[in-house]
Amino acid sequence: MSTVTTRADSTVVRPWQQLVIIWALLLTVPFWLPLLGGYTAIAGRVLVMALAAMGLNLLLGYTGVLSFGHAAYFGLGAYGAGLTLKYVAASTPLAILAGTLLGGIAGTLFGLLLVRRRGVYFAMVTIAFGQVCFYIAYKWDDFTGGYDGLRGFVRAPLDFGLFKLDIAGNGTLFYYFVLFVFGIAVGLQALILKSPFGRTMLAIRENERRARFLGLPVEKHIWLSFSISCFFTALAGTLYALLNNFADPLGLNYVMSGNIVMIAVMGGMRTFWGPLVGAVLFVMLQDYVSSMTTNWMFFVGTTFVLVVLLFPRGLMGLLQRKGAGS
Amino acid sequence: MTSKLTLTKRRTFLTATAAIAGAQFTGPFIIKARGETPVKIGFIDPITGSLSALAVTEVESAKWTVEQLNKKGGILGREVQLLVEDSANDTGTGVQKAHKLIERDKVDVIMGDVNSGIAYAIMGVTAEKKVFHVVPGGHTDPITGKDCKWNVFRTCNTTAMDAAAVTGELVKKFGKKWFFITPDYAYGKTLQENFVKNLKKAGGTFEGDMLPIANADFSATLIKAKAYKPDVLLNNMGGAAQLNCMKQFVQFGMAKEMALGGALYELETLRSVPKEALTGWWVFEWWWNQPNVPAVKTFVDAISPAIGNKKPTARHWMAYVSIMAIKLAAEKAKSLEAVKMAHALSDMELPPEVSLSPNKVRYRAGDHQLMSDIFVGEVQQAGAGGPDDLFKVETVVKGEDAAGSAEDTGCKINWPA
């Protein structure tokens, strides 16, 4: 491992180059995507799924713990935002705040109960909690809209006093709003990963026993990592509700959890930008191939299998030499 | 050598030019008459997932209908293009596809979805983008009830209509003591509420169980039903659960003790159930065997060869009526502008070759719900009409009579300024 980390500077594409390329592409999406036959709304969906998977990646890629129930926090974020817009106030920032807090706090509380589990047991308990949230949303018809989903809310324009930003009626403006929130979120994630706490997450991932012998409170750190991860995924959920003007129980279902894991793994779960690349691949495949054939899931599945077999570090692993992401 | 090549090229050029010029005269004149831009209809349906059997039928019919329309000059003299997108029974994907069809493909009209939840979500997008939208087969009431929109029209019935249509018949034939087996989600709850409302009006009593949507073991509930001794057992479950419930109902020997009935049943499901489960009193939203309506026979004869020589189902009818209604609305409005089309279609009586029904049928102005005929009758083992003759129509209830007033649905249509 030590020989690997010393070769970090031999990255094919250096981090600052990655950053410039990624942000240049993201900032200019409304200009080049239509030329390639795309549309701005799909770029918003890519960002949302990427943020959800990046949230999961803090846990999966950087702490080494697999959650198969992150859709719960994603969906709770979506319901939190939708319920706020519907019943409390027509304020988009308030909806985002409420949804993020709902999903994040739920994750924090669930996390307390599962930090002592490891491996398959940890994953199983996360699925169970996810399904609990799914059935609550599914059964509580009067409040959540049940199986039909929560409707009757729309994202509100942003009111800055002197001027208003019409993110409700202008798709391009809404994309930039999502990108702005995405930018803040990934900036925060980068700060967390660079902090001493971020380094302890890596230490736990690499060798939990050694980290424990070094005196690190492993359970507490995993719980914190899980909690932070849930806050970011819940934030993505709030944006998903705003994107669709709708929240439904399938957003809380284990199938969605599987999609989030798949995105993180395809993109590269030990790399910072991997989930974004995974989201581009997953959403585009789903969108374009499903227009051509009803067997589109076969192609998504085959791509996943091929990526896992040929590039175990995900697509971003192609751009980075072994270990550069560590 | 050079001169030979030049000569060959010139000859080729002349031949090609003559061929292209000739093609202008030999091609179908109808194509020449069409405008340059096609009329685009975007159809979002769950072609994959648990509702795929119904969605595939709708899409099959939509493709056939568009083909027929194009043979007769399209819509407003323009070719019709059908763009089908799979919602995969997922709301987020459905909404994404609506954006794709409207923003990228610039469709004039949206159709979809079988899944009511997705239909709701798509309604949000089409209303925001002011695109004309027809829901061929999503049943939950609020689509044309309290959540109705000026641009949305629905072809299939509401659960309230289906329940109202069959209640009178079941009470009249069997009695007022009922037992419900209902799926525990919004559709099932709305359906049961509507049944109970109608039953109470008739002075009836009831008991029932709400079960998970994909329930497989009905023994406990059936024992409970047996002890209650109802006149009718209402099976409101859907798909495989509906089938399992019916099989166990027959195995428990309950068919001799009480009548079996329910609201929605589909020919697609009937084809796959075992013989012993072909029983009970049900509602069909359209039936292929209507001897007194000549237009139905014409339709059945025309579409059958294109769908594997089977009889068309209610889902074929829903997609057919929806597309024909789009044509009628556009031609009455002389425009593809959503507001004009919506005004044109409101209260328009559909001609018999479109409605394919014995009574007058229209999309009601008050809630944009199609007031179609509802076929109440008994499911039977294959009759004289062939393997698809699995239902015997006893009564046809007029949509207007089953639906109640538009005001009662809670719909208030707010037209754009």
Image (cartoon, rainbow, N blue to C red):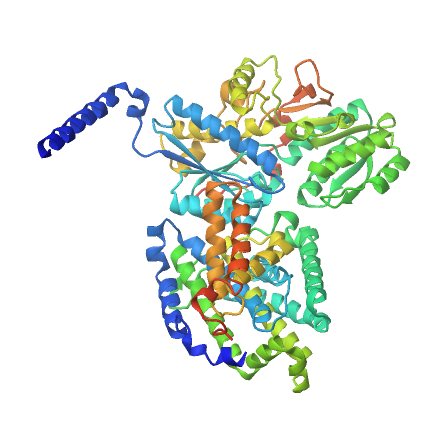
Q: Residue at x 65, y 32 (%)?
A: B161
Q: Is residue A177 left or right of residue A263?
A: left
| Residue ID at (66%, 67%) | A106
- Determine the residue positioned at 67% across, 83% down: A212
- Residue at (62, 27) in percent of width and height: B285
Residue B390 in picture, x, y percent from top left: 69, 21
- The reply to whether residue A8 is visible in this rendering is yes
| Number of numbered discs overlaid on the protein picture | 0
Q: Quadrant of residue B357?
A: top right
Q: Nearer the viewer, residue B338 or B310?
A: B310
Q: Is residue B329 left or right of residue B197?
A: left
Where is residue B56 shown, x and y percent of the image?
Answer: 56, 34
- Image quarter of residue A28: bottom left
Rendered position, B19 above or below A78: above
B65 left or right of B266 in image: left
Query: In the rendered view, would you say A136 is above or below A194?
Result: above
Please tell me in which quadrant of the rendered image residue B199 appears: top right
Q: Is residue B177 visible?
A: no
- Residue B249 in percent (x, y) is at 82, 32
In this view, the residue farthest toward the bottom is A215
- Specify the farthest residue to the front: B1
Q: Is residue A198 above or below residue A181?
A: below
| Residue A93 sits above or below residue B277 on the image | below
Image quadrant in which the N terminus of chain A is located: bottom right
- Residue at the limit of the structure toward the right, as seen here: B227
Query: B345 or B122: nearer the eye?
Result: B122
**Residue B9 location, x and y as percent?**
15, 31
